[in-house]
Amino acid sequence: MDKFTALPQERQQGIATAAMRIFGAVGYRKAYISDIAAEAGISKALVFHYFGSKKALYLYLIEYTGKIMVSEFQQHKGDDESADFFDRISQSARIKLAVMNHHPALMSFLNSMYHEDDEEVAAEIRELLSQSKDVRSELVFNGADTHKLKEGVDPDLVVNILLKFIEGVLGSRLDNTRSIEEIELEFTQCLTMLKNNLYREEYLS
C-alpha cells in the first residue's frame, strides 16, 4: 500500500475512482482486477503491485470512502448549526447530497457495499460499517436537542430509523432517473411528516 500512497494525489484519486466504479457496478464477486485496471488506464500488474489483492483494494476503498464522508461532515458541521434534532437530520442529508453530487462513483460504491454478502469481505464490511456508524452518529447528533420528542420516543431508535431512511431516499438517486432537487424535496416533505408525528404539540408551529 505504501507504493500506492506514494503516488501523486491526483493519480491515487483516479485509480480509486475507477475501482469504485467497477465495484459499484457489479459488486465484489464479479469485479475483475483487469476491468479495474482498464478503467484506471493502468496495467493489471500495477494494481496488484499497489494493493497485493482484490480484497486489499476493496478494504482500502471502504476506508477511503469513509474518510471522505467524515471529512465532509466535519467540514460542514458548523454550517447553520442548530441543536434541533430534525435540523441535524436535515443537515446530514444536505451534506450527503453534496457528496453524492460531487462523487457519484463513491455513492455507487457505498450503495453496493451496503448490500455486499461475499464471505471474503462480509465480516470486514460489518465491522467497518459499525465503526463508521458510531462516528457519523457522533458527528451529526452530538449535542442535538431531543427534549421535544414525545414521551416514550427513544431518540436512539429514531436515529437508527432516520439514518436508514436517509440511505433509502438518497439511494434512489443512483439510478440517475431523479434530480438532486426532486430527492431533496421528497426528503424534506417526509422529514416534516415525521417531525409532526414525533414532536410534542407545543413545539410544532
Image: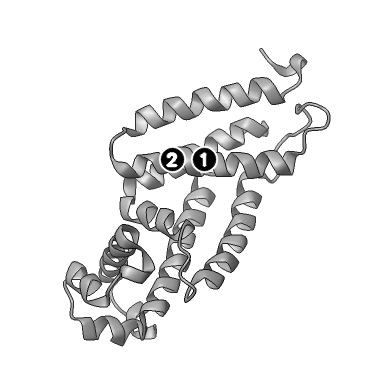
Q: Quadrant of the C terminus?
A: top right
Q: Quadrant of residue 1?
A: bottom left
Q: Nearer the viewer, residue 58 or 74?
A: 58
* Residue type, mark 1 in image: Ile
Identify the residue shown where x is 60% and y is 39%. Answer: 162
Q: Nearer the viewer, residue 134 or 58?
A: 58
Q: Residue furthest top?
A: 205
Q: Nearer the viewer, residue 11 or 153?
A: 153
Q: Is residue 137 above or below residue 130?
A: above
Q: Residue furthest right?
A: 151
Identify the residue shown where x is 53% and y is 26%. Answer: 190
Q: Are the residues flagged by discs 2 and 1 in contact, CB closer than 8 Å? A: yes
* Residue type, mark 2 in image: Leu
Q: Does dot 1 land on a helix, a strand or a loop?
A: helix
Measuring from the top left, give residue 42's x and y in whole percent: 18, 76
Measuring from the top left, give residue 204's x and y in whole percent: 69, 16
Residue that mark 2 sits on? 170
Measuring from the top left, give residue 133's x and y in whole percent: 60, 55
